[in-house]
Image (tube, rainbow, N blue to C red):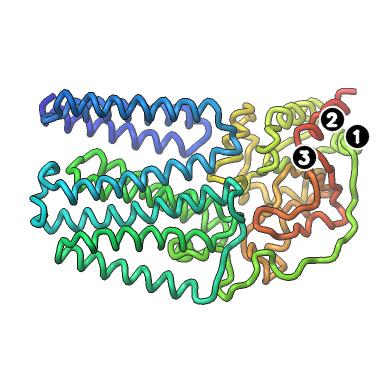
Amino acid sequence: MSATLSTLAYLVASVLFIFALRGLSHPETSRRGNMFGMVGMAIAVVATLLRPGMSGTGIGLVLLAIAIGGSIGAMLALRIQMTALPQLVAGFHSLVGLSAVCVAAAAFYAPESFGIGTPGHIHGGSLVEMSLGLAIGAVTFSGSLIAFAKLQALMSGAPILFKGQHLLNAALGILLVVLVIAFVATGSAGLFWLIAILAFALGFLLIIPIGGADMPVVVSMLNSYSGWAAAGIGFTLQNLLLIITGALVGASGAILSYIMCKGMNRSILNVLLGGFGTDAGGASASGGAAKEQRPVKAGSPEDAAYIMKNAGKIIIVPGYGMAVAQAQQVVREMADLLKKEGATVEYAIHPVAGRMPGHMNVLLAEANVPYDDVKELEEINPEFAEADVAYVIGANDVTNPAAKTDKSSPIYGMPILDVDKAKTVFFVKRGMSSGYAGVENELFFRDNTMMLFGDAKKVTQEIVQALQR
């Protein structure tokens, strides 16, 4: 393939990637968006293999790598549970970051293979690109590993804080910039690895103070970092498509992070600098001392079915508990039965419900819930006061009134779904444990709340059975 045809193929692939992002912006067009992305990637891979200068040995090695990676990816895709997707995405981000570090190292030690100079005499511009790709890639790698560990419960989801944390992060950030400048000026191998080590440490320190309730924004932020790392290495490889694709991923991830921060009433600057959603003074993530045990009203699925059967408007609030129980199908079945009884049924989605952006939307789409029934926070919140029933199925932190009343809470200031304004609230939960942010939910103790203890799928199935009698 000539250089002109290769460039044209890259341009077509880039356009398809833009269409993919556009399609993924709405559940109704998300399947089409995925198809655009897959076709674009196929074109990109073929065009890369047929680029001028690619030897038979090189093509064979690339195909071998694709076969190995593709087999592992296919196996994971077939086996992965929906609840584990957030940590899988974090794991993928870590691999992108590590790839950027490896490519930067290869370019540094074999610059002639990349057309950027010779050992000890690498072009200045290439050193800038290389160091940026190295630094961002290393931050992405270590930060994504911490996010994976928190999501997989290999370490505590609560913020890990210590005195002077933000000052240390700021100092390391400044030192990293100084090292990059020195590396560009000298091309020293020692400085190259100092940048890598410092960036690995900075990625670790930026993510450990972030609480579990804020993980969806972390996943989005790391997605953005991985894109910028890829773009930086694209310059080193002189690969136009990698630059464009990395910039698209980086920009879209940054925009999504900003939108989610706005939805949570957080500062985007705090996300970028670490310590997001935490008290820099070292306050506990639990929002203070443990509260005394208070009585709650516990009900049965039959009680819920009776009240819901006589309700005119019902709002279902899905959360991570629904994902864990894989209850989305039976929830939709319950909604269909209630609609037959003449009730209006809608779904309320919080922007950070679940463990990754759009987690609940994906689950509901999997259950073929009509898109028109799914409402975002701003649209649905005024309707809770008119609702006869709010059915909360495993959504904890995003329904907690403490976000409005308790200034010591790590979720204070985060907009929540106004579930407490409904006439009756049914809260499906296995027990009285706190949410992922480690905060006790004040909604449990409200007079209009009835707890339905048990597995979300089993409880909802029993409600469906009661409705059918």
Residue 231 to residue 166: above or below: above
> In the orientation shown, which residue stands out farthest toward the front?
190
| Relative image position of residue 76 (x, y in whole percent) | 50, 30
Please, what is the three-letter code of the amino acid marked with disc 3? Ile
Nearer the observer: mark 2 or 3; the answer is 2
Please, what is the three-letter code of the amino acid marked with disc 2? Glu
Q: CA distance from mark 2 to mark 3?
A: 18 Å
Q: Which residue is mark 1?
A: 302
| Relative image position of residue 193 (x, y in whole percent) | 27, 59
Residue 179 visible in this rendered orientation of the protein: yes
Which residue is painted at 86% across and 27% down in the image?
Answer: 467
Q: Which residue is mark 2?
A: 462
User: Which circle's residue, 2 or 3, is located before the other in the chain?
Assistant: 3
Secondary structure of the residue carrying tag 1 is helix
Q: Which residue is mark 3?
A: 314
Q: How crowded is the residue under tag 3: few (<14 C-alpha within 10 Å), some, or many (20+)?
A: many
